[in-house]
Amino acid sequence: MAKIVTLTLNPALDKSTEVEKMIPEHKLRCSAIQMDAGGGGINVSKAIHELGGVSVAVFPCGGHNGNVLCGMLQEKGIQIEPLKVNAETRENLAVRERSSNAQYRLTTPGRALEEQDADKCLESIRGLKPEYLVASGSLPPGLPITYYEKVASFAKEINAKFILDTSGEPLLAAADEGLYLLKPNLAELSALAGVSVLEMNQVDDAALDIIKQGKCASVVVSLGAQGALLVTRQGFEHIPAPLVKKQSTVGAGDSMVAGMVWALSEGKTYKQMAQIGVACGSAATINAGTELFHQKDVWRLLNWIEQYGERYRITDFSCSTLSPP
């Protein structure tokens, strides 16, 4: 029995580089390309592995890029269950402008995936009998926008706790079916609540309403550089994020999800889960390009959150309006 299984329906070969300055119409001299196996669920599995945990990554892959992606994961010792398809696995590119530290992220849609192939991924998961099923990332062309709702129903069928990290219509549809844990940012929480924007003092109530509607058991609202807000039926608590020098935001959300599901699988409390998630997300921003985090940075930042975070907690939730991170 696999304790944690991740599902990535739109994997990618992530490439990153740096230039001194982005100038239109000029030939730009870049640094050497860095390549990483990417896609939401794959990033979650990589991060769980870095924490010392074990997961199985399930994903479709094809062509040269698919072979490279599988090889990278196997070299890291990550357990994989790839489904071979005819379509070439997509590529993404992140470019950091050194002069401004601005990052440009070029994300491709990927080739179409047949629903019958996506269903084969679910059948692979059925045989793994996971306790936690984590789906993260966008849906590829070819799948209905309600496909994650189908995954949520499937998770109930196999008695797996389903954690989903996506956005837009796929998130709304899946939430209607019911999830174990939601990690929306403010824009996504607003959409789930059916409003265009939420005031700070409305965030906890909106998340609690979602829980009471049976859409999930708990909500961790990502507040970007301000950390996260943990909401359960018992109340809410702000988890502050430590101040770090940001290099890249690629994979930060997936790292946060990985920290939370790893913590849950280790029997941690909801508060500890959220703290570890924020530490992982913050640690991922320290590294340039598409690299995730290093374990030593997670424990260092977690120590700050546990020891000093109390001073930086937001307690007055009527003070301002937060823009989506």
Image (cartoon, rainbow, N blue to C red):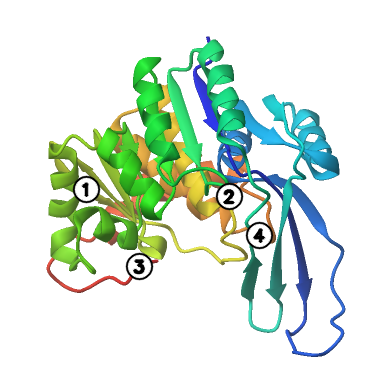
Q: Nearer the viewer, mark 1 or mark 3?
A: 3
Q: Amino acid at mark 2?
A: Pro
Q: In the rendering, at what x and y percent does residue 180 appear? A: 31, 31
Q: Amino acid at mark 4?
A: Thr
Q: Nearer the viewer, mark 3 or mark 4?
A: 4
SS assignment at label 2: loop
Dot placed on the residue nearer the N-terminal end, 1 or 3:
1
Disc 1 crowd rating (10 Å Cα; few below 14, some 14-19, many 20+) is some
Q: Which mark is residue 108?
A: 4
Dot placed on the residue nearer the N-terminal end, 4 or 1:
4
Dot placed on the residue nearer the N-terminal end, 3 or 2:
2
Q: Nearer the viewer, mark 1 or mark 2?
A: 2
Q: CA distance from mark 4 to mark 1?
A: 37 Å
> What residue would you read off at disc 3?
324
> What residue would you read off at disc 2?
141
Dot placed on the residue nearer the N-terminal end, 1 or 2:
2
Dot placed on the residue nearer the N-terminal end, 3 or 4:
4
Q: In the rendering, at what x and y percent does residue 97 appear? A: 70, 78
Q: In the rendering, at what x and y percent does residue 191 appear? A: 27, 58
